[in-house]
Amino acid sequence: MATLSTDVLVIGGGATGAGIAWDAALRGLDVVLVDRQDLAEGTSGRFHGMIHSGGRYAVKDPRAAVECIGENRILRRVAADCIEDTGGMFVTTPFDDPAYADKLAKGCADTGVDCEEITPAQALRDEPRLNPQISRAFRVPDANIDVWKAVWAMSHGAQQHGARILPYHAAVAIHRSDDQVTGVRVRDARTGEESDIEARVTVNAGGAWAGQIADLAGIEGVRVLPGRGIMIAMNHRLVNTVVNRCQMPSDGDIIVPVRTVSVVGTTDVNTDDPDDHTVNQDEVDAMLDDGEKLVPGFRRARALRVWTGVRPLFEDAKPAGTDSRDVTRAHALLDHEQRDGVRGFVTITGGKLTTFRLMAEETVDAVCRQLGETRPCKTASVPLPGSESGENYRLGERLARKEANLIDEQVICECELVPRARLEEAITRTGSTNLDDIRRQLRLGMGPCQGGFCIYRAAGILHARDGLSAEEADGSLLDFLQERWKGVWPVLYGDQLRQVRLDDWIFQGVLDVAHLPRT
Amino acid sequence: MRGELHFDAVVIGAGTAGLTAAVRLAQSGARVCVLAKGHGSTHLAPATVDVLGYAPDLITEPAAGLEKLMADHPEHPYALVGAEVVGEATGWFADVVAAGPLPGYHYVGSLERNQMLPTAVGALRPSALVPETMAAGERAHLVGVCIVGTPALRDFHPSLCAGNLAAAGIEARAVSLDLKLERADMSTLGIARHFDDPTWRRQFCAELALTLRAEEHVGLPAMLGLRDPHAVLTDLEDRLGRRVFEIPTLPPSVPGMRLYEILRSALRAAGVSSTLDGGRLSSVSTNAAGHNQTYRAPAYVLASGGFASGAIELDSHWVCHDRVLGLPLRGLPAEGAARFVPTYLDEQPLARVGIAVDGELRAEGAENVFVAGASLPGAAPWREGSGEGIALASGYRAAALIAGQSHTKQEATTA
């Protein structure tokens, strides 16, 4: 059995885990990161894409608001290429408590969140699709983030500093020698092979799965209550700024423009299982109704896809008497040496995507404490690979690049403007034969046709390039279609059903993928 | 009346079903108008005539399979029109193509036996009648085959196609020829225009010949010319000294565009006016380029398609409508029952929704509206491999019913 040895082993390749790998690698530590699936395939890849200004928490949770605005300002610099500076808006619709607007303004002033009241007329000039009945409007510095781009940038950055990133490696056992965690046994999900990784400190960055990972280490009482929420992507940008309802945070009160689509979210349903991806009909109906309140006519737009994400809501079920718990914090950092007398193990969970960098910083600080070393954090000033210019992403960028090479370049995915060269580069770089992994890398198949045209092309290119057998390429194609269908059918109506019928025509009619030779 | 045009019959929809009904009506002497919002299914489909491929197991003899399907599913469109009409309609269709504007271009096959033709991904698909340009792809003829693509064509991947054919036991290999085309990104339509040019074709054959082995057939994406595919095929086969065939791939479909032109030409020959824009039915109004127009006729054919064309809609409150005439639907999942199932390739409960009709294709609640093609309920064309068969047979039958009805009326008046 192969054995790796490292300073820091991170379990969990979401934004926090990748952020920890990047942070620790920048501080000169040797790092290995493992995830049971692809990077950002859990909660990080399953949210609405919003970087909060802090306005949403300004009334309810001022400390979270302070963290958000601080991180918002940092991320715009260090993750510039992943962030689109859409700006955000809070609007009072006829469905909202009119008294909340003044509370918001005061909360923002108290927490340092930039917040400027504008007239409803100005708000409607900026966002003509908004409900014309709005009575108050505030501008805030919300933004959106391409989380896959950010996670891959951190992962590449960490690799450039020597880190080893191992997606599809599930932690199956955590090794302990008395009161010291010494490493982890992982299983390669693709080959089934197991190996051991020895580490001076193991970080549990499992998010909603952190309780399961703590159990593996024999740590009691790390209880993460998964809060499941659905999000629906609509086929274009119904709004160009993040629009929030001006009320206490609730379900379905945000619309976030992300790339070429907009996302409405979200619900909050307690569940026992973080892998529960049930989409309830009544949640879908509620989201569409909520969308309609912010943008009249919302239901006439095409719903592309629905997905669920699980918030990691941490509850320390260990009897009180420890000082490692900080109940006012949205995220929870558990130093198990302090909490349980177990050295070499740290858990980070809870929190929100906007503050992932801060969570990573605090976690690596705790790791350094355990290692007895002083290594200052650099992630607030060192830009991620690709973000060195400090320029934020703009929506027109891909089109501008594409138009420059109109004659010489083949576009494989028209919706998301993915050229052939980028697809081939991603296949080579990732070594992945899974088209769904490639989708997250390139946004291939994420647009209105949901892979109707590009996935046959991509499967053909994958097969020709990667030396796959035809059966393996077929499998990748069929898996993609099934995975796509999962997110499509619960919100399938109107013109999107028409689109899907066209896709059916292609896959089941012209190509007849249902009758491919199987082994 | 101002703004009104009067016809013997108005056909709504310009897919295979609508065009078939219109040509048949015109051939019977009726004054016909075709109204359509854009093109029909022809530009998307492989242009093979799929009558019955699966029920649910593979059907080798469609004629025999039809008998059983009709007996088992009395609500199926085939059961409404009858086996005889399916045979007549497909025979008529083959004649229309042969007499059409593309010299020598014809369909081969019959209802006696399905031909198994490769798709672009290398699956084998059953069709009853196929364009001559595809015939040599029939599995039974394929001893060895060279699948040929070109890097500029992103919509066809020869190695994957050949790989799957090999997995099905056919000796298949792939060749990717750099055709030095004008752009890095070409569609089959763009390359089809090159194939129409004899000089270009000669160069293509010279280059391809270098890579070919003894007896193998040549499979190319469906792009062997738009104007004169028969000449293109003959020329390629002569120059290469072997059988050559087309493989349908992603839209736009070159053989589908040929088919559309053939049916349009038959319409023109029969004197049909067609508009391409956008209790008892009394008239149809259209709005094209800001101009409103009313079309009135004693009989109408509704061949506007199903969910794919948008003629039938499921709205965001999960209610289905006929968006064209607001007619009642049939085949809807029961209240509260699933609209879709979670496995993509399983049959979806919504698949068999269509306009409710009686045994003579008359829409429920509109006795002078005859329904044809994908507007009909009770079929699952992709799963069954039955789309064109239903379109032809029901379009043909709808025309016969309308023509028969007006004959009866004329006779009554004369008497």
Image (spheres, rainbow, N blue to C red):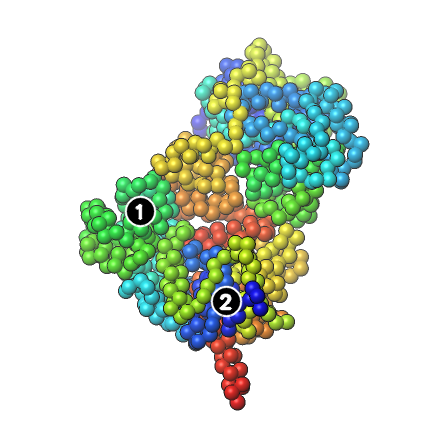
- Please give the name of the residue rendered at 23% of the width and 52% of the height, measured from the top-left corner: B198
Q: Residues within 10 Å of mark 1 (few under 14, many from 20)?
A: many
Name the amino acid type tagged 1: Gly
- Please give the name of the residue rendered at 44% of the width and 72% of the height, measured from the top-left corner: B26
Quadrant including the N terminus of chain A: top left
Q: Nearer the viewer, residue B402 or A478?
A: B402
In this view, the residue farthest toward the bottom is B415
Quickly name the residue at label 2: B11
Residue B167 in percent (x, y) is at 34, 51
Q: Is residue A415 above or below residue A506?
A: above
Q: Quadrant of residue B295?
A: bottom right
Residue B99 in percent (x, y) is at 32, 68
Q: Are marks 1 and 2 on the same chain?
A: yes
* Left or right, B319 with reference to B101: right
Q: Is residue B324 above or below residue A427?
A: below
* Left or right, B29 with reference to A86: left
- Please give the name of the residue rendered at 42% of the width and 58% of the height, measured from the top-left corner: B42
Q: Secondary structure at mark 1?
A: strand
* Label whose residue precedes the other's in the sequence (1 or 2): 2
- Please give the name of the residue rendered at 65% of the width and 22% of the height, measured from the top-left corner: A69
Q: Nearer the viewer, residue A408 or A324?
A: A408
Q: Quadrant of residue B307?
A: bottom right
Name the amino acid type tagged 2: Val
Q: Chain of mark 2?
A: B
Name the mark on residue B149: 1
User: Disc 1 versus disc 2: distance between alpha carbons?
Assistant: 40 Å
Residue A323 in percent (x, y) is at 72, 18
Q: Is residue A159 above or below residue A91?
A: above
